[in-house]
């Protein structure tokens, strides 16, 4: 019992946890969880909602807490030992999950409750949970014969390990790439703050002069946007695009092929045509046909605009620098240059107004105005890394949540930005348990002379992840599996993408966009330029997102049995949207973590799907005022607090009074009048 993970805790005791604690803690918690499930399935009492469905919902609570700590740290603060433990415990967890889903006695009880639900006076949330549990069992092998169930177990174990290996390889490739530059002429155009960070990194890592550039976004993106030296951009882009596609121990081609084929076999075993058919049955879209139609409808509007913008960029590059062979490493650079010329706006002009702590403060102010939440930093909680900040979130003086915020890149943290929880919200024994929510980002670090100044894109990323966090923090449901962001994946992006809209509104920007040296509020002319440039090259941006959705379905919406060449398959998927020459040494699939490591397989389209929802939803705020209390309260009560307790379209219609139409998105994007 000296193991801190086996003590009763609310906030994780991060500073007491050592790697050696995880396996014994998970083993013991697994045994306890198995016993709970065994008691439910062997009970001699007649099966009812309370002793079967509700009991199962709240079983394994200790295991869930320990596993959430482990896997969240394996993403945000990992090391080789932790990765090895992940490989060892993943089969245990996969086996346990299958032991539940393939437990005949347990399923018999669940089926009884499902078929006799009219005899119980269930409320809508209980009915929703019952349907979810019953479908989860039937969709995951409860009706298969013993031989089929055994194969399902094997597939799930393999998939868990392959997915982990995929992520480990991408992280290793990201960490292994370092581009050391000593020639000053090669860094022309790169902002001073970025160069200062690169110089500090060179000294820290190698005790070298010059600059060290990496594939972390705060290093990679500015080079692609601002480096005048074309060869430098080319080197970095080729490094980025070849992650896990090289002839070395970290190559992910085998993982991609195995994952896609195993997912297909699993879907077939369960009676579905493809993995996409299986996944989309439990999404707003319902079928691959709907998704394809949705993508094609947007493509019809976006592609002509993208082609016009692309030709404009090529012409601009040729006139500016005589570039006649426009390449992928030129796009971001000339886009930024043309944007600067068109709107007299440089990203570097904006950064002084977006100091990280001020942006956080502004985000909190906006949330207070909209939803009445209060945020107080609390330094008493244990942390897994000194960079992490913690906040008590209050509503009318009462605890609502704890927020963990982790903002800067480091070797043990995977790329990108995400929201996660260390404990969900739920109600048990009359106690409303409040969630522990975390947002993890990879923003520019402070240097010796500069604080952390965000690009405007980093500002919108922060708002995006905080929108997810609000979904978790404002949850008010009985059952943890229906709480917060436990909703259909093509609905989950609505709160996150909706909150991004406030980044473009003068009324919101004036609350936090202040010069970090002079405290001068961002001038109205800069705000006007931000708004005017919001749709710049929107056709190309839309085409890019839609192409990723098509690549996802190219792996998951087909029978991939005969696919043996990852690169060739990817090229074929990109054919309808490709405007630039291919780079033979680069491949997106081998580093496409969203679909091969995260939960977005067959669901990448949902970013665009949710954009339709968010554009339509924000119209309601714009019509009545972006801080209108009535509209904010309505969104809070109909969407943010309800989690997955109601069908998403019903929730949306209860907020908006109608189904969303793509017109609001297309208008906002400037793709239609």
Image (tube, rainbow, N blue to C red):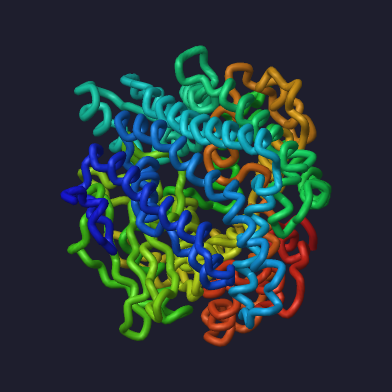
Compared to residue 11, the image places residue 630 above or below, namely below
Residue 303: quadrant of the picture: top right
Residue under the image location 40 percent in, 81 percent down: 430
Q: Is residue 250 above or below residue 360?
A: above
Q: Give how far across and how far down residue 504 sits, in percent.
A: 54, 65
Q: Name the image quarter holding residue 202.
A: top left
Q: Which residue is at the far top?
A: 247
Relative image position of residue 425 (x, y in whole percent): 43, 69
Image check: 209 left or right of 457?
left
Q: Quadrant of the C terminus?
A: bottom right
Residue 559, position in %: x, y? 77, 31
Residue 160 drawn at (x, y percent): 51, 36
Q: Residue at x 63, y 25 (%)?
A: 257
At 52% from the left and 75% from the top, the residue drawn is 641
User: Would residue 91 be found to the left or right of residue 357 on screen?
Assistant: right
Q: Where 264 falls versus 493 (above or below)?
A: above
Residue under the point 60% across and 42% down: 338
Toward the viewer: 670 or 613? 613
State the residue in front, 567 or 424.
424
Residue 659 appears left or right of 583: right
Q: Is residue 515 visible?
A: yes
Is 251 drawn above or below residue 601 in the view shown? Answer: above
Q: Is residue 499 visible?
A: no
Looking at the image, which residue sits at the far front?
44
**Tag count:** 0
Q: Is residue 219 left or right of residue 608?
A: left
């Amino acid at each position: 019992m000296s193991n801190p993970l086996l003590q009763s805790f609310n906030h994780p005791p991060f500073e007491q946890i050592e790697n050696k604690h995880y396996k014994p803690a998970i083993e013991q918690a697994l045994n306890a969880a198995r016993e709970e499930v065994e008691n439910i399935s062997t009970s001699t009492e007649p099966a009812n909602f309370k002793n079967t469905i509700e009991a199962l919902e709240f079983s394994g609570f200790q295991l869930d807490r320990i596993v959430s700590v482990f896997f969240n740290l394996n993403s945000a603060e990992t090391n080789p030992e932790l990765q090895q433990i992940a490989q060892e415990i993943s089969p245990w967890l996969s086996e346990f999950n299958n032991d539940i889903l393939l437990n005949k006695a347990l399923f018999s009880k669940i089926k009884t409750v499902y078929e006799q639900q009219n005899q119980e006076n269930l409320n809508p949330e209980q009915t929703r949970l019952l349907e979810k549990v019953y479908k989860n069992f039937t969709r995951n092998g409860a009706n298969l014969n013993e031989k089929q169930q055994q194969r399902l177990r094997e597939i799930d174990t393999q998939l868990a390990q392959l997915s982990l290996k995929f992520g480990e390889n991408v992280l290793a490739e990201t960490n292994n790439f370092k581009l050391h530059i000593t020639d000053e002429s090669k860094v022309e155009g790169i902002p001073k703050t970025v160069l200062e960070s690169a110089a500090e990194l060179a000294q820290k890592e190698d005790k070298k002069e010059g600059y060290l550039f990496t594939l972390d976004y705060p290093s990679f993106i500015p080079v692609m946007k601002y480096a005048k030296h074309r060869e430098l951009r080319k080197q970095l882009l080729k490094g980025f695009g070849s992650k896990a596609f090289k002839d070395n121990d970290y190559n992910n081609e085998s993982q991609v092929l195995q994952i896609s084929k195993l997912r297909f076999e699993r879907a077939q075993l369960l009676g579905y045509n493809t993995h996409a058919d299986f996944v989309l049955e439990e999404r707003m879209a319902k079928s691959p046909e709907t998704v394809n139609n949705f993508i094609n409808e947007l493509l019809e509007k976006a592609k002509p605009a993208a082609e016009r913008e692309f030709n404009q960029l090529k012409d601009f590059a040729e006139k500016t620098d005589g570039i006649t062979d426009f390449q992928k490493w030129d796009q971001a650079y000339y886009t930024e240059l043309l944007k600067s010329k068109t709107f007299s706006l440089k990203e570097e002009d904006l950064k002084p107004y977006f100091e990280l702590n001020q942006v956080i403060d502004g985000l909190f102010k906006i949330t207070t105005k909209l939803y009445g939440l209060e945020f107080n930093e609390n330094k008493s909680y244990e942390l897994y890394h000194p960079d992490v900040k913690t906040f008590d979130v209050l509503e009318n003086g009462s605890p609502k949540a704890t927020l963990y915020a982790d903002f800067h890149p480091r070797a043990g943290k995977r790329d990108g930005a995400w929201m996660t929880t260390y404990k969900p919200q739920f109600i048990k024994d009359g106690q409303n348990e409040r969630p522990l929510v975390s947002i993890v980002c990879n923003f520019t670090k402070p240097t010796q002379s500069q604080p952390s100044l965000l690009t405007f894109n980093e500002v919108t990323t922060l708002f995006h992840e905080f929108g997810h966090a609000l979904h978790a923090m404002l949850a008010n449901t009985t059952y943890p599996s229906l709480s917060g962001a436990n909703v259909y994946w093509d609905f989950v992006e609505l709160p996150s993408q909706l909150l991004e809209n406030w980044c473009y509104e003068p009324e919101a920007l004036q609350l936090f966009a202040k010069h970090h040296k002079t405290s001068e509020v961002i001038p109205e002319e800069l705000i006007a330029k931000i708004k005017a440039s919001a749709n710049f090259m929107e056709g190309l941006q839309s085409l890019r997102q839609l192409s990723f959705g098509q690549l996802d379905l190219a792996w998951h919406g087909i029978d991939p049995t005969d696919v043996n060449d990852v690169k060739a398959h990817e090229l074929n998927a990109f054919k309808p949207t490709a405007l630039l020459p291919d780079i033979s040494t680069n491949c997106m699939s081998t580093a496409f973590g969203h679909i091969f490591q995260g939960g977005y397989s067959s669901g990448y389209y949902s970013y665009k799907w949710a954009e339709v929802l968010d554009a339509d939803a924000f119209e309601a705020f714009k019509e009545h005022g972006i801080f209108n209390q009535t509209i904010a309260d309505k969104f809070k009560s109909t969407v943010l607090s309800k989690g997955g307790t109601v069908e998403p379209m019903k929730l949306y219609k209860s907020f908006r009074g109608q189904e969303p139409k793509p017109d609001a998105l297309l208008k906002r994007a400037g793709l239609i009048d």
